[in-house]
């Protein structure tokens, strides 16, 4: 099957015995608009459009994006291989023959948290199944330190695998984190588990998930004790509100996040609860909020040197690229995506939005385009000679 979302829309529409006009009526758009999506003349880059198409067709957003995708890179393969091990870490009977060194386990959990923000996926793939299994085993031994360690391990694992399309497993990890947080004498664990649940709900690709994401994050933000989680929960609530086109709530939550971040909270969960990262989220929110053309403007207010980790640096360039693309500025779209790819390739190459954008730009140039665009296409797996083709494994 083609790697293009529009091709999958046509595929599922045909299977459903639905005409383009019927799909357009369900979505509240025109038939020519659906035709442009299916024919590769309009990329599907906005979450609300993707969710609307999936809901109208009665399929999941993953059915339209083709995630999780077979691995194409070393990082992809690392996460792909870790997923069944993570399922086993949650489900299999724990090996209780070897004692758990709690101090060593805590250090490994922190190492995994750091590796996620550094986008070190081979290290994450090695650490995550071990720390999830060992923190679970510690919990079943009734060690009072276990619940908080398990929350950290499960949150890190869920946030790692979610962008790769393994949303079902991320949801299970989030649920287990929420259960463990009720046993941990640590309000930050409750906030972290709620943040993860909200992230997974937004990634579920349903309108109900969007609303659940907003409700979960907003309620947790109101209860959050520590400043770092106040920042992160308000930011996620703002993003969720933007996806639901609720600008007043966007403004309220974003302002609350700014105020908390201005107090320079500690960052024991390695989430970058900083003013600079608040600025990165503002770029993401602009894309969701129906003002993507302002994303480059907001990005220009962020000093990249104030961002501590590759994960955040790459995200700034990614969402800036989405803004440039919405403004039909293809040259700067390519520059921003190449900048993101140079920082954290797997943050770029795993995203269906990037493939949609690059494929659209290649189609618009009829397989030509600048040397930079052709290089970008090669990196993300789009064939300039056949941008609608499936690059396979």
Image (cartoon, rainbow, N blue to C red):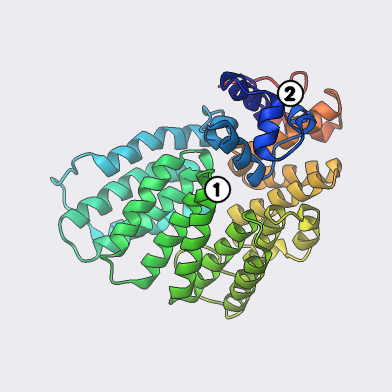
Q: Quadrant of the N terminus?
A: top right
- The tag earlier along the polypeptide, 2 or 1, is 1
Residue 317 point in image, percent of width and height: 71, 51
Closest to the observer, 36 or 255: 36
Residue 267 in view in this figure = no
Residue 225 in view in this figure = yes
Residue name at image x 43 percent, y 49 percent? 158
Closest to the observer, 203 or 12: 12
In the rendered image, the vertical position of residue 176 relative to residue 389, given as above or below: below
Residue 365 appears in which quarter of the rendering? top right
Q: Secondary structure at mark 1?
A: helix
Residue 78 point in image, percent of width and height: 46, 35
The residue where tag 2 is placed is: 387
Q: Outermost residue, bottom direction?
A: 263
Q: Are marks 2 and 1 in contact (CB under 8 Å)?
A: no
Alpha carbon distance from label 2 to label 1: 30 Å
Count residues near mark 1 (Cα–Cα under 10 Å), then give few for <14, some for 14-19, many for 20+.
Answer: some
Q: Quadrant of the C terminus?
A: top right
Residue 217 point in image, percent of width and height: 49, 63
In the rendered image, the vertical position of residue 166 relative to residue 374, given as above or below: below
Nearer the viewer's eye, disc 2 or disc 1?
A: 1
Compared across the picture, whether 37 is left or right of 122 comes to: right
In the rendered image, the vertical position of residue 33 relative to residue 39, given as above or below: below
Residue 351 point in image, percent of width and height: 61, 39
Residue name at image x 62 percent, y 45 percent? 344
Count residues near mark 2 (Cα–Cα under 10 Å), then give few for <14, some for 14-19, many for 20+.
Answer: many
* Disc on res. 190: none
The residue where tag 1 is placed is: 207
Compared across the picture, whether 18 is left or right of 368 comes to: left
Q: Outermost residue, left direction?
A: 97
């Amino acid at each position: 099957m083609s790697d293009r979302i529009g091709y999958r829309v046509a595929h599922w529409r045909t299977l459903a015995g639905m005409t383009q006009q019927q799909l357009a009526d369900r979505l509240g758009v025109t038939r020519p608009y659906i035709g442009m999506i299916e024919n590769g003349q309009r990329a599907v880059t906005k979450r609300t459009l993707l969710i609307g198409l999936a809901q109208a067709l009665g399929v999941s957003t993953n059915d339209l994006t083709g995630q999780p995708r077979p691995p194409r890179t070393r990082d992809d393969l690392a996460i792909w291989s870790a997923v069944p091990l993570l399922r086993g870490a949650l489900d299999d009977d724990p090996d209780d023959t070897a004692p758990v060194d709690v101090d060593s386990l805590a250090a490994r959990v922190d190492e995994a948290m750091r590796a996620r923000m550094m986008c070190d996926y081979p290290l994450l793939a090695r650490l995550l199944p071990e720390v999830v299994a060992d923190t679970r085993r510690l919990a079943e031994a009734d060690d009072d330190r276990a619940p908080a360690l398990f929350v950290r391990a499960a949150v890190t694992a869920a946030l790692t695998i979610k962008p790769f399309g393994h949303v079902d497993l991320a949801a299970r990890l989030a649920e287990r984190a929420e259960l463990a947080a009720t046993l941990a004498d640590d309000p930050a664990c409750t906030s972290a588990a709620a943040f993860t649940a909200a992230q997974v709900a937004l990634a579920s690709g349903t309108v109900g998930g969007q609303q659940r994401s907003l409700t979960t994050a907003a309620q947790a933000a109101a209860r959050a004790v520590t400043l770092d989680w106040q920042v992160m929960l308000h930011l996620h609530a703002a993003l969720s509100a933007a996806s639901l086109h609720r600008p007043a709530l966007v403004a309220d939550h974003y302002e609350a996040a700014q105020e908390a971040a201005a107090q320079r909270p500690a960052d024991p969960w390695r989430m970058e609860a900083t003013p600079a990262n608040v600025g990165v989220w503002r770029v993401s929110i602009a894309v969701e909020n129906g003002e993507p053309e302002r994303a480059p403007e907001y990005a220009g207010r962020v000093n990249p040197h104030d961002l501590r980790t590759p994960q955040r640096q790459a995200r700034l360039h990614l969402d800036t690229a989405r803004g440039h693309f919405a403004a039909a500025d293809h040259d700067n779209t390519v520059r921003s995506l190449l900048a993101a790819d140079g920082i954290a390739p797997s943050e770029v190459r795993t995203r269906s939005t990037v493939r949609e954008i690059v494929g659209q730009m290649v189609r618009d140039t009829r397989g030509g385009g600048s040397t930079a665009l052709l290089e970008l296409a090669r990196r993300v797996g789009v064939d300039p000679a056949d941008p609608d083709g499936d690059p396979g494994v």
